[in-house]
Image (cartoon, grey):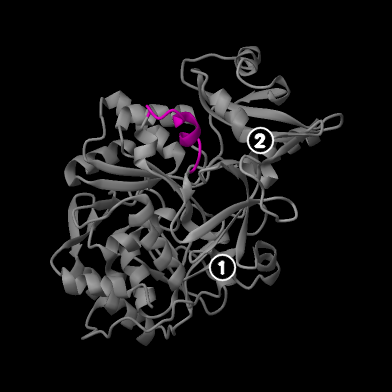
Amino acid sequence: MNIANWLNDAARRWPQRPALFEGERLVSDYAGFAADAAALAVALREEHGIAPGERVALFMKNCCEYLELFYAIWWAGAVAVPINCKLHRSEAAWIAENAEARLIFTDEGALFGAGQLHAGCVELAGRGAALEALKADRGAAPGPQSRSADDLAWLFYTSGTTGRSKGVMLSHGNLTAMSLCYPVDVDAVDANDAFVYAAPMSHGAGLYNFIHVRCGARHVVPVSRGFGAGELFELARGHGQLSLFAAPTMVKRMTDEARRQGYAGEGIKSIIYGGAPMYLADLQEALATFGPRLIQIYGQGESPMTVTALSRELIADRTHPHWQRLASSVGQAQSCVEVRVVDAQRQPLAPGVPGEIAVRGATVMRGYWRNDAASAATLVDGWLYTGDIGYLDEQGFLTLTDRSKDVIISGGSNIYPREVEEVLALHPAVSEVSVVGEAEADWGEIVVAFVVLHPGQHADEQTLNAWFVERMASFKKPKRYLFREELPKNSYGKILKTELRQSLESAAAAS
């Protein structure tokens, strides 16, 4: 089962259906999309000797060519290694070397200097005349290379917040199962839909391409090749039935810009959010602004986009007697997985009791690339132990508290940063907040809150603590508040708590 068969089939069924757009400009229909992918696959094999199972890296910003190259790699039976375009080229070179990539495509084909890539890895231009030359004069290209469901298709490198990133091995079968869960558990798809790639194609947004190819929908890359709320709104008005995957910080920025413009979501079909906590205060504002267009998913690279989902109907139903509790959850298990919460001995816990979240099913990775120790620690008897902490209720709704490494143990009590952040985020002066633990001799750790205020707003430690103790137990309140203009984030808008902890450690060492 080669996932590229889906593009081949779409081209046969709907050759003239519009497929790829740059902004509102049509780049290719499905016949052209498949023909370009097939021609590039021939070039990979004939000019560069790429054999099935070999790795080809992509270190590019979002573009229509990214999708063409994705499918060319799979068409040839090779493995795609998408690399976050915001990484430094030395980090990208390390990933390419670890993956033993034979080729790496970059925007212009001249990003890496002599000796910066490992021996045997060739850099090629992923756009422009050089790429067009690769497609030219290929003749009748054969269909996609035969692959099994267990064959590797996508090598996804984790963010590496606790050290060197690890290569998550995702098979054709993993990607198929993930994709088929989408219309069942997340959102129905049809030919009139358009999916916009405002978040990086190297991550979750790129993973959602498959089901939209399978259904012959439109694929839209913003002219900016990235995220801009105003640009998204224009694309929604122009295309209609526009869906996107967004991190909560992106949703927050969309909400702020929509309110500034008086925009109410015209042309947007669905905003699927995930990748980090969406604070209830932000969700309420987004719901009031965009209406019933919000859907939540929870997943990891190791079970891509597919652990739980919370439907638009539940999110939008403010009359539900338990709306606040359900909206604060990440929903129920998706169709192809089982989810449980376990204790330190990996025994299932009763509803309401927090522990580590474990998942098993057809989407769970094959393991980490050439890292048997990490694979053995994370995959046990078919279960993926996520490192996330949460609890299930009687109806199977999963609520996240934190990553296991983020739990703060202060004076012998466990404090979950997310619950502290939820309370502080409700304060009208607070724009963003992130809570971490800081080592302290008497308490073991103390709670430290990094806070960004709305422009023109004022709040100090005394004000925020008074707000906090009215809403949550006093022992959980921050011992320190550090006010910042902005918080460090990755390319998906996820706050980098590792950098916040490092700043505390550096300040302590300097003092």
Question: Is 210 placed above or below 420 here?
Answer: below
Checking the image for residue 416, the label placed there is 2
> Observer-nearest residue: 132 or 255?
255
**Magenta residues, start to end:** 318-330
**Residue 117 appears in which quarter of the rendering?**
bottom right
Disc 1 residue type? Answer: Gln
**Residue 451 appears in which quarter of the rendering?**
top right
> Observer-nearest residue: 72 or 311?
311
Question: Is 431 placed above or below 25 here?
Answer: above
Q: Could you tell which of marks 1 and 2 lies nearer the N-terminus?
A: 1
- Which residue appears farthest toward the right when viewing the image? 442
Q: Indicate left or right for 83 with 7 as reference.
A: right
For the stretch drawn in magenta, the main secondary structure is loop
- Mark 2: few, some, or many residues within 10 Å (few <14, many ≥20)? many
Residue sitting at 49 percent across and 77 percent down? 150
Mark 1 lies on a secondary structure that is: loop
Dot 1 corresponds to which residue? 116
> Observer-nearest residue: 322 or 51?
322
**Residue 401 appears in which quarter of the rendering?**
top right
Residue 310: percent from left, percent from top: 42, 44
Checking the image for residue 504, the label placed there is none
Disc 2 residue type? Answer: Tyr
Question: Is 397 placed above or below 371 here?
Answer: above
